Image: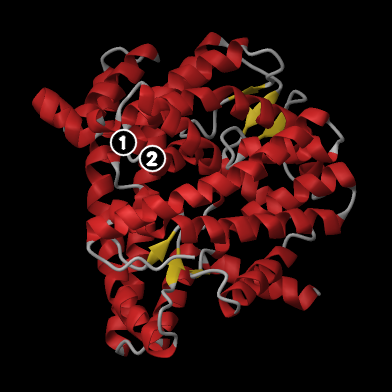
Amino acid sequence: MELLASFFQAILDLGSSVFMPLVVMIIGLIVGLKPSKAFGAGLTLGVAIVGINLVVSYMSTSIGEPVQGFVETLGLQLSGLDMGWSPALGLVWSWRYVFLMFVIQIAINVVMLLLNQTDTLNVDMWNVANQGFTAFLIYCVTGSVVAGFIAGGIQVILELKSSDATKYQIQELTGCPGIGMPHPMFLSNIIFYPIACALDKVFPAETKLDCAALQDKIGIFGENHVIGFILGTVIGLIAGQGEQAFATGVMAATALTLFPMVSKLFMTALTPISEAASAWVQKRFPGRQMVVGLDWPILAGNSEIWVAIILTIPVALAVSLVLPGNTVLPFGNLMNVCVCAAAFVSCKGDLRKMIVISWLMVPILCWSASDFAPMLTQLAQEVGGTLPEGGLQLAWWGMDIAEVRWAAVEACRGNIGGIAAIVGYLALCIPYFKAQRKEERAAAERMGVEYIGK
């Protein structure tokens, strides 16, 4: 078992910018791509991953630091310290059983591919920590490792099914052929999609407001860099930066300008792989279509995600200070990508709907972070991790599928509300996946490709 754990730790140590390009290059060679093209595609993917991560980090710094400074100036403090997604998942990797999630995810994916129950080959190994986190939470409340990994396995299956159900829509939104999105955050769309449909009565689809429509309406004030400058400057002024707020505006403008540029590298990297893989699959498995499952940053070039995120920051801070039962102040993870990236897909990029959903999710993110803080703190104590001073607890505000994990934990505790929430969520899966088949056919038709679905 120690040998197996060491093997998967070695994979993690390579980093996503090395491992994922290596996997994609191997896939390219298997499906008949020339070695030079396979190497070039893999390397370009590595550059795209590093580039997106750099811009996301830059965006977080430019917006997050003035807001955090404002919070510190006011002396605001709650008992839970939001450490952000990276330290939180890093802590999960220290759980002694988590490496088993690698084996479970790979096994489930292979079996489902062989049984023609999925078209997604998930190469995003880093988000195994997300299934591991779910397993850890269930283990904490049940004391059963088996129950934890059953929950993690169910999450793997739903993620693959979610990827299958949205692959044409993802390809249309990104311009990258042959990809899917088996990231856990998109399981929230099982809830977001009906909300988005209900919001059609308030914001009809024909009046969709995305960044392109915004630019048509207000000219230069709707362009990415101008939107970034305005929002960044306003955030800076709210944070009390004075004239420095204009520098914050320029930094936000830079980030919103760079996102679409860097995201194009994903299409450059994945197009030759996709074309070769499609030909290989069609030759050996007529009528089937395999897609490569990737992480969410391939969507990061869509400015609507970042506009919705920025407009949610002041709401999140205000709500966290007055919400009964909340103990966590958003701090390390102010960029609530988990909601806005998922909502971007379910809302078809309509900013109005995305913002409504993002604001509605703020209390859920607060309560779930507060509820899980003792568990994360206990894990840190068990593995000898660094704990915050002053008796503060470690927390993760803005976690993926917070509402689903919260309901699952409460259900395992025997809470009737949690049981009802999980039953309701699973019941929503049926109309959701049925509706996505219609959405997928429409997306395939718009792209002029043949629809092949489950």
- The secondary element bearing badge 1 is classed as helix
Q: Cα distance, mark 2 to mark 1?
A: 7 Å
Q: Quadrant of the N terminus?
A: bottom right
Q: Which residue is mark 1?
A: 304
Query: Which residue type carries mark 2?
Result: Phe
Residue 243 spot, x, y in % from top left = 26, 15
Query: Which residue type carries mark 1?
Result: Glu
Residue 363 spot, x, y in % from top left = 59, 22
Q: Earlier in the sequence, mark 2 or mark 1?
A: 1
Q: How is the image coloured?
A: secondary structure
Q: Is residue 150 left or right of residue 45?
A: right
**Which residue is found at the position 52% from the left and 46% from the top?**
432
- On screen, 287 above or below 402? below
Asked where in the image residue 277 lies, by quadrant, the reply is bottom left
- The secondary element bearing badge 2 is classed as helix
Q: Is residue 156 left or right of residue 59?
A: right
Residue 65 at least partly seen: no
Q: Is residue 41 left or right of residue 1?
A: left
Asked where in the image residue 233 lies, by quadrant, the reply is top left
Q: Are marks 2 and 1 in contact (CB under 8 Å)?
A: yes
Q: Which residue is mark 2?
A: 344
Which of these two is toward me, 348 or 442? 442
Residue 275 spot, x, y in % from top left = 29, 77
Residue 365 at least partly seen: yes
**Which residue is found at the position 69% from the left and 12% from the top?**
324
Residue furthest to the right? 143
**Which numbered disc, 2 or 1, marks the residue closer to the eye?**
2
Within 10 angstroms of label 2, few (less than 14), some, or many (20 or more) residues? many
**Which residue is found at the position 66% from the left and 31% from the top?**
369
- On screen, 190 above or below 14? above
